Amino acid sequence: MAEVLLKIEGIHKRFGGLHALNDVGLTINKGEIYGLIGPNGAGKTTLFNVLTGLYVPDEGSFTFDGKNLFQAKPHIVVESGIARTFQNIRLFAEMTALENVMVGRHIRSKAGALGAVLRDRRTREEERAIEAKAWELLEYVGITDVAEERARNLSYGHQRRLEIARALATEPKLLALDEPAAGMNPRETEELKELMSKIAKGGVTVLLIEHDVKLMMGLCDRIAVLDYGKKIAEGVPEEVRRNPKVIEAYLGAAHA
Amino acid sequence: MTKAQDSKKVGVFIASAIALCVLPFIVGGSLGNSWVRIVDFALLYVMLALGLNIVVGFAGLLDLGFIAFYAVGAYTYALLSSPHFGLHLPFYITIPLGALFAAFFGILLGTPVLRLKGDYLAIVTLGFGEIIRIFMNNLNAPVNITNGPQGINLIDPIHVAGVDLGTPISLFGLNLPPVYLYYYLFLVLTVIVVIMAWRLQHSRIGRAWVALREDQIAASAMGINIRNIKLLAFALGALSGGVAGGLFSAFQGFVSPESFSLLESIMILAMIVLGGMGNIAGVILGAVVLTIAPEILRDVIGPLQMKTMGRMLIDPENARMLLFGLAMVAMMLVRPEGMLPSKRRKAEFRDAKAAAAQKG
């Protein structure tokens, strides 16, 4: 039995009359690539926002790496080791690529206002370490050549990679990617797939939302399917693919 | 960097240091001591504008009540160094204390507005500024703390190492009136504030502020504690406002609530916007221009009307505000990013414009 990294149970999230997440539970094991699929509006991104602290769940339990993160603030979640990217890329557009990744080091560095003003040796050393780590991560995702460019001017594929580098800068145990392949051409998708495998091999667990079911089937160790705020299936890709509920959700009842 | 560039930099640095040191003599010698006084005020406004720039320019939180922190610093000094309570504490206690009080008030303001942004934040901060002023105006009963609208008089001048900055001294045969002495004190503190602001901007904290300004949700997803980083901006901005307030109090020898009106808050914000939000050099330029320009207008408008039309057509005070307003409008139309914008802000403006054009 693999070691459990993240476990949520009975998560409910309501927006007024909309029951966006209805009794959702899932378990992610250390080192796997875990996929989350479902039709539009199924609650995937809502679940993502709950897992990263941006939304506060109404009920349920949420433990990560032995820590209780139920209703925890985003910065606590990040500190505990969950980092994310966004469906509609949210880089700091006017900062350079390098600065974006340096912001990602925030939680793993300490210098406060006093250190900044006094520029003591520790602060200077930390600042150098932040920059060195940022360069390292840009290299890791393969975009060092645009390090000094403003994020806004980067190509779409580069922006996606930069967002991943920025998330990795927080030293996550779990990297949550919200539709990273959206809008990418087949070649870029293939490169991204390689990058994700590399990240997973490096010991970071990956949680992935994706529309591209084919990509998910080939990449993920396990997959969960959401529909109307409920988890309707979970398992290895082959199992999920044959699950009648999943076929119904995706293709309509006539095909089931 | 090459050696030639390095030595050029050192040259510019030494030249500007010398220029700043002899400035009061040049200004005082050619235009009189009242102009040295205006230069002193320009330095106070530079400190204020740099403080507000931390909140508005770096962290992107619109604050229309910044003058409140100036007031807190000024009143702290006034109450602790005047006959009002019979206390005469030295400046190295009162000014830091005023700065700390101001920072405390910064947090006091920051806490309830954590969830607000844009217009809503502006309105609440505006209200806060007014509340402080009204408090100063009314805290004379039942216990007389601030002496109400009459203000506090006979505030002690600053004594540095036994030298009373409030009385003229002569040094190497040079006669140095108080405005000269305060100039040097203000200059030293302004330089400290500039260095502080610059170092903060280029630090982990400064990056977190920019991240907050550009995208709060992404910033929180990077593990930045939004609450703390906002409060830090409010506190550090207020700190510098508090220092300027204490200096103002000692320099004037008198404070009253009138000095801390909404118009002052707006002026400081205008300095930042006109100079170039987020860019320290721009903010300094904005503060200097907006302190000096109205004074030049004051000296020019009256005599000019008398000369050209033979009589006063428009009251100089009104004409001054009119011209000033026109200049601001023109500036916002022609160069909305300010005189010396930061590269980043400039880009933000350009992108906003492009987005607006796309929407049609």
Image: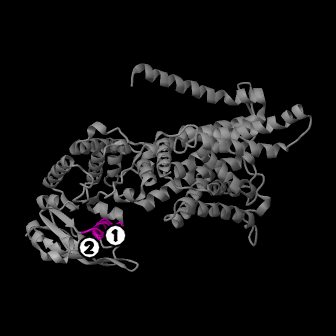
Range shown magenta: A39-54
Task: Indicate left or right for B10 with A228 as reference.
Answer: right
Name which residue type carries label 2. Phe
Q: Viewed as shown, does residue A183 lie left or right of A198? A: right
- N-terminal of the pair, mark 1 or mark 2, is 2
**A75 or A146, nearer to the observer:** A146
Snapshot quadrant of residue A66: bottom left
Lateral position of residue B174 relative to residue B188, left or right: right
Q: Residue at x 37, y 57 (%)?
A: B218
Task: Judge by depth and name the residue closer to the eye, B84 or B279.
Answer: B279
Q: Which residue is drawn at 66% across and 41% down?
A: B330
Residue B290 percent location from the top left of the image: 67, 41
Please name the residue that numbered disc 1 is placed on. Answer: A72
In this view of the protein, can residue A164 be seen by the observer? yes
Subunit under mark 2? A
Q: Which residue lies furthest to the top in this view?
A: B4
Three-letter residue code for mark 1? Ala
Could you tell me which residue is drawn at 56 percent across and 61 percent down? B121
